[in-house]
Image (spheres, rainbow, N blue to C red):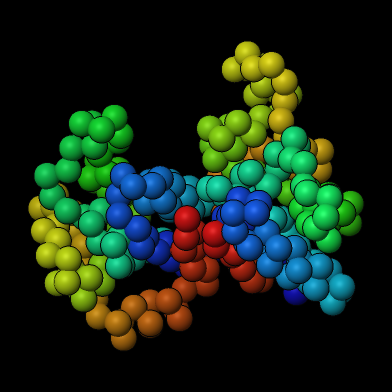
Amino acid sequence: MKRYLFIISRSPYASSHALEQLEAAMVAAVFEASVAVLFRDEGAWNLQQDQTGGSIGQKTLTKVLDALPAYEVEELYVCADALGTLGVQIDPSLTVKPINLTEQQSLISTSDAVITAQP
Amino acid sequence: MNYAIAVHGAPYASEAAAHALSFADAVMAGGHSIERVFFFHEGAYQGLATQVPPQDHFNIDMVKRWQHLAGQGVELGICIASGIKRGIVDKAESARYELEHPTLAPGFELVGLGQLIAAINSAERYVEFPA
């Protein structure tokens, strides 16, 4: 079983980056891979509480994130530095582990495939 | 060694394809193999059949270079969700959405996102070329 890491580094709604990365992560989980998602840089904004994507005609990212455990994507990480710098308030429905840069390095080096899909 | 390759950039807007093609050519020349090239996000535009590259640029006809790779037995799979929303449609999708004509270049095919994961699963290395 391969270990996949999806890195989301762009904010929600400005592009379809986060949504498409999450879709790919769910597909990987269907393949019975071990799947982790790391939010870093502007990507930490995806975790912000009180999102209403509907007001600009988009899916609310939080709803997609809420669905991840149902697909057995249960390992969610966020860059602790980005959280602090941006002042993101994580939605209380989400279970996300803040990790520092050293822990991110180890997460990347212990993954078989790292999908960043930078737009 | 067997490689899975992903391309995320559009032609001319980014160097993703140029770098991916050089890498793919080197992989094949080195006697290795490519499980699949997967085009995701803006990379879907690589398979647009109606591109007319400027004639005064050397070696810039990306579609021809991709097709040359396909000629060596390499699968070129475009994420169907990324593709159809950008107007990259094959015969079947063109008919399904009642469009005037298909726009997918020969040598490419529209495939599900699962084909990216399947390629990574089968390959020994995954290399992606961001936009």
Q: Is residue B31 left or right of residue A114?
A: right
Q: Quadrant of the C terminus of chain B?
A: bottom right
Q: Is residue A12 left or right of residue B111?
A: left
Q: Is residue A61 above or below residue A47?
A: above
- The residue positioned 59% from the left and 37% from the top of the image is B83
Q: Is residue A21 left or right of residue A59?
A: right
Q: Is residue B33 above or below residue B40?
A: below
- The residue positioned 75% from the left and 74% from the top of the image is B1
Query: Can residue A106 be seen here?
Result: yes
Image x and y of residue B130, in percent? 55, 62
Q: Which residue is farthest top?
A: B98
Query: Can residue A76 be seen here?
Result: no
- The residue positioned 45% from the left and 81% from the top of the image is A109
Q: Is residue B80 above or below residue B46?
A: above
- The residue positioned 25% from the left and 33% from the top of the image is A56
Circle count: 0
Q: Which residue is farthest front?
A: B56
Image x and y of residue B27, in percent? 79, 72
Viewer-proximal residue, B80 or A72?
B80
Q: Is residue A83 above or below residue B109?
A: below
Image x and y of residue B114, in percent? 57, 46
- Residue B36 sits in quarter: bottom right
Viewer-proximal residue, A78 or A45?
A45
Image x and y of residue B20, in percent? 69, 64
